[in-house]
Image: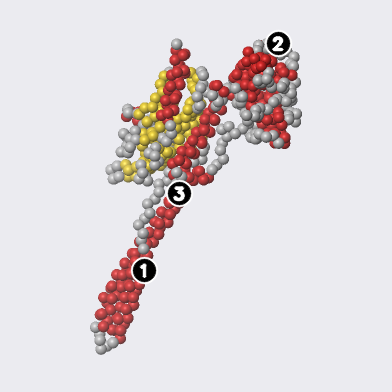
Amino acid sequence: MTDERTEMPGAASNQYGNFQQADKIFNYHTGDDSDSRFQAGERNLYDRLYPAAARSFDEYFSRLDQISSPASQQRETAHLYNVLALLSGDPPSYRSPRDAEQISAHLLAAQGHRWAAILAAYVKADYFDAAGMKTPAAFATLAAQVRFDSLTAEDVKFLSDHLAPIDGQLWQMFASHANQLGAAVQIAPTATLAAAPAPDENRRIGVIKYFSPTPIQPAPVMATTAVALAWVGGFLLIVGIATCGLGASNQNAPGTACMGIPLLATAGGLLIAANTAFGRYRAYQRVLDEFRRQWAAAEPKPSDEQISSWLADDVKRIEVLGARRHRLSLNEADHGGDLLVVPQSVVGISRRTRDVMRTRMVPTAAGPMSVLEQALEPVARSKRGRDGHLRADNYHVLVIYLTRSRVCAFECELELATRRLVSEEAQSFRYDDVIKIASETISAPHELQRAVNMMFDDGSGRYSQIYVDDRFTLSTVDGGRIVVSIGFSGRTTTGQGTSIAWGNQQVLGIVERMVWSQKEPHNQ
């Protein structure tokens, strides 16, 4: 297999081991000299094994003078490689103050290199400036010397392999220079992490249709009945009038006029029936127009799988956003990230409500009287899919990030149709602070009154308000609780219990197992 690693311009030749050079292979694995440590760190960096690379470069510097001593070409390169290893492919804002201090020291020690000012400006923009922190004077001076015209296409390729896109003008300038060089890699001109998605009209309409009841087509009313009655009635009316006129003009047959009276009466009855039939037909046309309008608003519906796919896309975006709020790398710890396992997401029914005006009948001395009053109504509408699971148009999403030392949580309310995040909340706590992780069903009446409500279509096409009494809970020692309503048991309704179309039970098992395993070493 061809090794496609890109060598840093100006760096010493990479010697990762050659079967024809056994002495160098031995030095790579067991050697104590600085060159072998440099080569080990370089190889780990190319393989994106960032923690191992950082350790190798730390050992490299431990065999040299202090970090501030005059830098040789290899030493400058080692400083810059160590910066990339410490960043671990994440935005600088994800790094700790200790990491930022080490990065600054390495860049100042290598400030004679053409990459130093660029990396300093990169760190300054996303770590110091984005947080409103004051940049150390020497570091700010180095960052101010940033120039991209000294970068070659190989430089751009190497840096883009290890740097995460960040917001702001600096990354746009870097991308513009890369495009001018015709760099082989595609570099986004702006950071795309957790970026607000563009509006999707097809999706918005699709979600609305999915939760709109499909109307029942009205029984047809034919106009031919009214037309037939009108024709017969009209004919009899003409014949009756003619008969009465003939009898009145014929003095010899006065009874002929009387013969037209029943015809006129019959004609009148038929014409009245025709008018009634026409009225029913006109009413049917109005009902049919309303049916067509409701049908167009409800059909064709997207499939259950499409709704689930849209939700999954948004949950991935929320996971990235939550990690950015907590300044966490989404990589697992073995690959330079912060997480013990991938983010664990719990999806439930939205807790949001809205004000509505309702009419209530109030008994009075003069009789019942209607009163207009303000009430709260759940925003979320939900229905069962063909698989029997709940899908909703508004969700409550909880993402749990399990790191080495703490549990981080990010909650938000998601509008599925618009992809808008209505509210956000981030918090973190130690493993020892977690006292309960459970999936439970509310049974106490006083708790049920405070449970999340939703508007539920049981298949009849009518939405009614019900309690969501199944929930995921995470409780902490200070009395705090994170609650996500994930379904209903069916005990509070006449329908069968069901849950959200999401793997919440699997998430519960992973979170519970990981949290307790992390608490045990702390308690020993």
Q: Position of residue 445 (x, y in %)?
A: 32, 29
**Which quadrant, please, contains the N terminus?**
top right
Residue at position x 58%, y 22% in the image: 336
- Separation of marks 1 and 3 at Cα, in angstroms: 36 Å
Q: Position of residue 259 (x, y in %)?
A: 26, 80
Tell us which disc is closer to us: 1 or 3. 3
Q: Which one is earlier in the sequence, the residue at label 2 or at label 3?
A: 2
- Separation of marks 2 and 1 at Cα, in angstroms: 107 Å
Q: Is residue 176 visible?
A: no
Q: Quadrant of residue 148?
A: top right
- Under circle 2, the secondary element is loop
Q: Which residue is mark 2?
A: 65
Q: Is residue 149 visible?
A: yes
Left/right placement of residue 491 relative to residue 420 reads left
- Mark 3 belongs to which amino acid? Pro
Q: Which residue is mark 3?
A: 300
Q: Residues within 10 Å of mark 1 (few under 14, many from 20)?
A: some
Residue at position x 51%, y 38% in the image: 419
Residue at position x 47%, y 29% in the image: 345
Decide: marks 1, 3 in contact (CB < 8 A)?
no
- Mark 2 belongs to which amino acid? Asp
- Separation of marks 2 and 3 at Cα, in angstroms: 72 Å
Instruction: Say if 187 sits above or below 53 in the image.
Output: below
Residue at position x 50%, y 26% in the image: 342
Instruction: Say if 276 sits above or below 302 in the image.
Output: below
- Under circle 1, the secondary element is helix
Using the image, tell me which numbered label, if any, was put on residue 227. 1
Q: Farthest front residue?
A: 20
Q: Residues within 10 Å of mark 3 (few under 14, many from 20)?
A: few
